[in-house]
Image: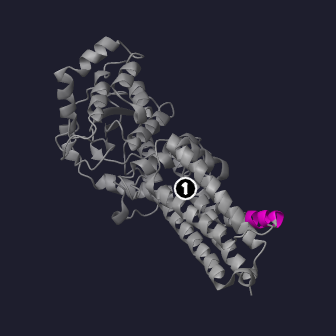
């Protein structure tokens, strides 16, 4: 039945079947990662085996990962499904038929190892290795080890046919996943930039004029439309709270949409949120929204709402530094630069960046001023009515919102009216899955 049977016996056949199982497991795990990416890109919280999901989200939204998706349509997780499915199919076919499938499995294993090296290096450059990705890398290593063991001593490989077989398997599964991948949203700031490109100002069927909000909603993909409907339901049902008097407001006080966000300076989701807001600036009227950033450092050294000993007090110092620049003409830009460099940020770098926006001596004096600490403590207490569960905590017009570009942009286009008639075109919201 199998070439491998005559050359290696039942044990070797068992290894090929085991390799097929590992490939399928990798494909399933990659599909799970893809699902978590969809959750994260729709304003939810993704699962991350180790930590709070911050590391995983940071890697998924890295420039490298975004470039892969924009150039191939498939996000990296979907490529994991393609690789796993192709690897499994080739291993099982090798058990039945031998070459060229055996050589194709070897080529696929080698390509997987190369991908692990490239993706691992790109992840480290982006700030670390996400734990879900590490599980994928381990699966690739196991598959490669089994395949290489099952083929030793290595025969003369039919490399040409093997390469063609491996490429064919990859292309088949790529074609199968292309449609679903096309519905996978990009990272928030990229989606804002592309979605703002307005489609026709009139309804193509009736010829009736469409508002900017109606035109925007037609650009959303299926998962985004559902996530937006869920988020709007949760927003409408939330009890509004009084928001603190503005201390450093970006935008006009009379804007119909007032966004308050509480951030931790080392939170990658906070960086992403700031980039999302920056993508909105210039794409909506200057009078349409305002933003005030408050602080909720995730360290008990300056956050009385957290238990346990202080672990990374530099969070507190960075928060105080952002507070010290509130009177700067470009406080928003300073905050963005600090968040952009959060992985390497310390007191020295904080002071260096502050020097671009004002006097370093004045800044250092402010860092040590007890009044700055008092403002930070006031920020923490101001978050209490909103029951913070993490950062960023995003409040829109006094109600809990989500740190998700389409939600914010839609509310801005609706002038803060979450019951705008245009939202009637969205799917029926799902209360149990509403994204808060």
Q: Is residue 120 left or right of residue 235?
A: right
The residue nearer to you, when weighing 163 against 415, is 163
Q: Is residue 435 left or right of residue 202?
A: left
Residue under label 1, please give it.
Answer: 221
> Percent x, y for residue 206?
61, 54
Quadrant holding the C terminus: bottom left
Q: Which residues are magenta?
A: 159-169
The residue at 46%/36% (across/down) is 275
Quadrant holding the N terminus: bottom right
Q: Secondary structure at mark 1?
A: loop
The residue nearer to you, when weighing 248 against 297, is 297
Does residue 185 sit above or below 179 in this rendering?
Answer: above
Q: Quadrant of residue 337?
A: top left
Main secondary structure found in the magenta portion: helix
Q: Decide: few, some or many residues near mark 1? Use Cα within 10 Å; few <14, some 14-19, many ≥20.
A: some
Q: Is residue 128 left or right of residue 383?
A: right
> Is any part of residue 212 visible from this angle?
no
The residue at 22%/41% (across/down) is 383
The residue at 41%/42% (across/down) is 268
The residue at 54%/49% (across/down) is 120
> Percent x, y for residue 125?
52, 40
Q: Is residue 251 left or right of residue 147?
A: left
> Percent x, y for residue 218?
55, 52
Check if residue 189 falls in the magenta segment. no
> Percent x, y for residue 9?
68, 84
The residue nearer to you, when weighing 84 against 147, is 147
């Amino acid at each position: 039945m199998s070439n491998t049977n005559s050359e290696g016996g039942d044990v070797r056949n068992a290894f090929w079947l085991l390799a097929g199982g590992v490939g399928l497991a990798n494909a399933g795990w990659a599909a799970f990662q893809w699902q978590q990416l969809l959750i994260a890109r729709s304003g939810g919280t993704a699962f991350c085996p180790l930590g709070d999901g911050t590391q995983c989200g940071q890697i998924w939204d890295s420039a490298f990962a975004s470039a892969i998706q924009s150039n191939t349509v498939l996000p990296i997780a979907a490529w994991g499904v393609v690789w796993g499915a192709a690897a499994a199919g080739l291993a099982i076919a090798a058990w039945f038929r031998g070459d060229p499938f055996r050589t194709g499995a070897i080529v696929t294993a080698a390509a997987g190892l190369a991908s692990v090296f490239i993706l691992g290096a790109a992840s480290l450059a982006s700030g670390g290795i996400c734990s879900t990705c590490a599980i994928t890398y381990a699966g690739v290593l196991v598959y490669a080890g089994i395949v290489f063991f099952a083929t030793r001593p290595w025969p003369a490989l039919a490399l040409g046919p093997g390469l063609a077989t491996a490429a064919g398997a990859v292309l088949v599964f790529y074609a199968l996943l292309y449609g679903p991948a096309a519905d996978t949203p990009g990272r928030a700031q990229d989606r804002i930039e592309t979605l703002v490109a307005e489609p026709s100002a009139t309804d193509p069927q009736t010829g009736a004029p469409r508002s900017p909000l109606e035109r925007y909603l037609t650009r959303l993909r299926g998962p985004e439309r559902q996530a937006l409907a869920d988020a709007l339901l949760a927003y409408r049902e939330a009890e509004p709270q009084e928001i603190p008097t503005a201390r450093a407001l970006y935008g006009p006080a009379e804007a119909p949409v007032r966004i308050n966000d509480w951030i931790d300076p080392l939170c990658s989701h906070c960086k992403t949120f700031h980039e999302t807001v920056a993508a909105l600036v210039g794409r909506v009227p200057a009078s349409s929204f305002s933003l005030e950033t408050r602080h909720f450092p995730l360290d008990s050294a300056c956050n009385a709402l957290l238990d346990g000993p202080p672990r990374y007090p530099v969070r507190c110092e960075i928060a105080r530094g952002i507070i010290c620049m509130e009177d700067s003409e470009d406080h928003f830009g300073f905050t963005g630069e600090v968040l952009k460099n959060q992985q390497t940020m310390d007191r020295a770098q904080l002071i260096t960046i502050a020097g671009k926006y004002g006097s370093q001596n004045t800044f250092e004096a402010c860092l040590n001023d007890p009044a700055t600490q008092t403002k930070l403590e006031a920020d923490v207490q101001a978050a209490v009515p909103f029951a913070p569960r993490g950062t960023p905590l995003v409040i829109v017009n006094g109600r809990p919102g989500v740190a998700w570009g389409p939600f914010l942009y839609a509310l801005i286009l609706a002038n803060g009216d979450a019951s705008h008639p245009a939202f009637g075109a969205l799917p029926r919201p799902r209360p149990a899955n509403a994204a808060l």
